[in-house]
Amino acid sequence: MIEHLAAHAEPPELVALERDELRRLRHLPAEGLSGQRARIEAAMKRTGERYTWGDIDEATYRVEAMAPPEGFEPPTPALGRRRSIH
């Protein structure tokens, strides 16, 4: 197995990218993610309530329900592939 791994070593620039990505992922604040989830869920609930109460029409509801919440950061490319926010 060691011989196989030695024969299939990754290019140094890819190793550097992988190390940077792992370093960044190690420092993700878990409580920050749960706080962001709570804010998103609360915003979605308020949008639904405004539609139910008749404060906004269906078209506005659909736009607001599908729009990313303020402060949302979409997944970033990680080593050439999309990364989930979960």
Image (tube, grey):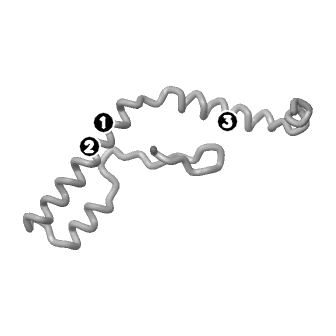
Which residue lies at the image location 27% right of the left edge and 61% below the top edge?
Answer: 65
Residue type at mark 1?
Gly
Compared to 14, does 68 lie above or below?
A: below
- Mark 1 → mark 2, Cα distance in angstroms: 6 Å
Q: Position of residue 42 (x, y in %)?
A: 22, 47
Figure quadrant of the N terminus: top right
- In the displayed structure, does residue 42 sit left or right of residue 10? left
User: Which residue position is annotated with label 1?
Assistant: 35
Within-10-Å neighbours for mark 2: few <14, some 14–19, many 20+? some
**Could you say where residue 59 lies in the image, as x and y percent from the top left?**
23, 73
For mark 3, what is the residue? 17
Numbered disc total: 3
Which class describes the residues within 10 Å of circle 3: few (<14), some (14-19), or many (20+)?
few
Q: Residue at x 67, y 35 (%)?
A: 18
- Residue identified by numbered label 2: 39
Which is in the foreground here, disc 3 or disc 1?
Answer: 1
Circle 1 packing at 10 Å, graded few (<14), some (14-19), many (20+), is few
